[in-house]
Amino acid sequence: MAHIANLYNQIILLFRILSGIVVVCVFALIVTDVLVRLAGFSPWIYSSGLVEYGLLWFTMLAAPWLARIKGHVFIDAVKVLLPAPVQKAMAKIVYVICIVSCLVFAYYAGGLFLDAIRLGQMDVRGEEMPLWTLLVPIPVGFTMVAIEFIRFLVGIDDMYATAEKEGI
């Protein structure tokens, strides 16, 4: 089990690095596109489509890591005002809602991904690309975010733990 957990942690770190690379590539593509326009040339026909792909890809690649480091948006003001036993129960309810939501998104996105492969659907913007290349990070990212919330639910980590408590 420790080997699987280590492999999973390595995948999260790899996704984080890939996400950063995608952000740099999107930035470079946007700057280049603008400079080409300023120079009086026609921009590449495919640049806006690639930027849109990049936005989705880096979001979904970074999502599990952001959940791991508690970098996602959440509100703990209500929890802080409640008594300790209620806080713990409320946290568990939040974790279950997050897990179910992520798995529902992953399930439906996975269905869209499989349909895109089965039907050979193409995404036609500036350049024709198989639609599955746009959809593939969604079920993977949401499944991994669900795993992160499962870690919170079973007590491996706590979403509401502060950075001071964790020594970050």
Image (cartoon, rainbow, N blue to C red):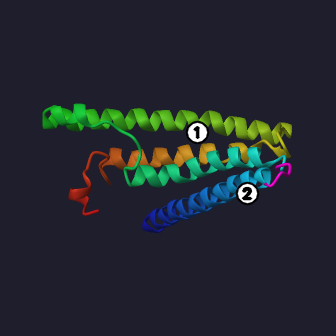
Q: From the viewer's perspective, is 7 left or right of 117?
A: left
**Residue designated by label 1:** 106
**Residue designated by label 2:** 32
Spatial CA distance of label 1 from label 2 is 34 Å
Q: Residue at x 41, y 54 (%)?
A: 68
Q: Position of residue 8 (x, y in %)?
A: 50, 61
Q: Residue at x 24, y 34 (%)?
A: 77
Q: Which residues are magenta?
A: 39-43
Per the image, label 1 sits on a secondary structure element best described as: helix
Q: In the image, what residue type sits under mark 1?
A: Ala
Q: Earlier in the sequence, mark 1 or mark 2?
A: 2
Queried whether the magenta region covers residue 41, the answer comes back as: yes
Q: From the viewer's perspective, is 31 left or right of 3?
A: right
The quarter of the picture where residue 113 lies is top right
Tell me if label 1 and label 2 are in contact, CB under 8 Å: no
Q: From the viewer's perspective, is 46 left or right of 14?
A: right
Please name whichever residue, 43 or 136, is drawn nearer the observer in this view of the structure: 43
Q: From the viewer's perspective, is 57 left or right of 36?
A: left
Q: Position of residue 151 (x, y in %)?
A: 38, 50
Q: In the image, what residue type sits under mark 2?
A: Thr
Please name whichever residue, 99 or 36, is drawn nearer the observer in this view of the structure: 36
